[in-house]
Amino acid sequence: MVDVIAFGNPVYDEIITPVVRTEGRVLSGCSTNACLALSRLGRATALVGRVGPDYLDRFQSDLVRYGIAPFVELASQTGGFKLVYDHRGDRTLDVLGVAEPITAVPAAVATARAVIVGPILQETPLALIQAIRSQTDAPIVLDPQGLLRRFGADGRIEHFLPDEFAAIAPLCHVIKANEVETKVITGIDPRIDPVLAARRLRETGCAIAIVTIAEAGSQIDDGERSIAIPAYATDARDPTGAGDTYMAGFLHAYLTDPRDLFRAGCTGAATASIWIEHTGPDAPITLAEVERRTSALLSQH
């Protein structure tokens, strides 16, 4: 049985940071990275997404190698970005390919313990999320990054708030957004007021809102408490996928004990800290190291 099934197109990205550069394109994507981390934490995962014929064989062999069950729809091309980061960690996105929206909802959804919706670029529309919700009572965890992206006039990716977000948010139990996404959704800068930002994100309709703020940690709001989560201090070589793997660590701990949101947040921070020390899908996340770093964060409380 699958613990977590994730919806979101995989991508093969080219990544350039001040300290590293990938050799060609590497496997990535919001839902993909979450599955990679969850599988290394001992969770049985499955990924639903669309891939073009150019990367289909490589993608299927990659997922088998990483222990993730693939539910693949063929697309006209494989999605991907060229990501260039500056010294502050801000990035520009240039599109290398776009796969079409997902239409399949595998039967495995009905028995999964949790569902992740983590789109890259508009591939998980309201109708898909409604179809998922109709087939499961399990918590849906949304990373809204791909819902908030579109092509600007210059052909580059820009952020916006789609009208259908108001209908999507109440279908989700958890929404995890980074600081840019939170500001797009709520109008609040979490660097200035993380408590208000997390509260406003939760007021969109979810039960639990998580706002990640890079080295400043994260804020969790469940309607009763607002919980500040510290970041695990480390040397970030590549921030790509930090939020995706935070979500994975959080969900891993949440499925074990949904009442202890502080531990879940610290587990998310610990997981992400390992991921950003490396580039690409082979970050050496282990349950033992995540638990060690989580314990270090818990001891600060």
Image (cartoon, rainbow, N blue to C red):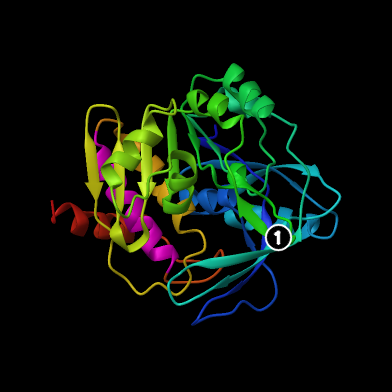
At label 1, which amino acid type do we have? Answer: Gly
Q: How many marks?
A: 1
Q: Is residue 64 above or below residue 188?
A: below
Q: Main secondary structure of the magenta part?
A: helix
Residues shaded magenta = 260-276
Q: Which residue is mark 1?
A: 80
Quadrant of residue 72 in the image? top right
Instruction: Using residue 191 as the reference point, say whether residue 67 is left or right of it.
Output: right
Residue 85: x %, y % from top left:
53, 72
Query: Residue at left 59%, top 45%?
Result: 160
- Residue 274 in the magenta stretch? The answer is yes
Could you tell me which residue is drawn at 37 percent across and 42 percent down? 210
The picture places residue 183, in percent across and down from the top left corner, at 44, 47
Quadrant location, the N terminus: top right
Residue 251 image point, x, y percent: 40, 40
What residue is at 31 percent from the left and 50 percent from the top? Answer: 218
Decide if residue 296 is on the left or right side of residue 211.
left
Graded by Cα atoms within 10 Å as few (under 14), some (14 to 19) or many (20 or more), the crowding at tag 1 reads many
State the residue at coordinates (70%, 43%): 49
Which type of secondary structure does the marked residue at label 1 adopt?
A: strand
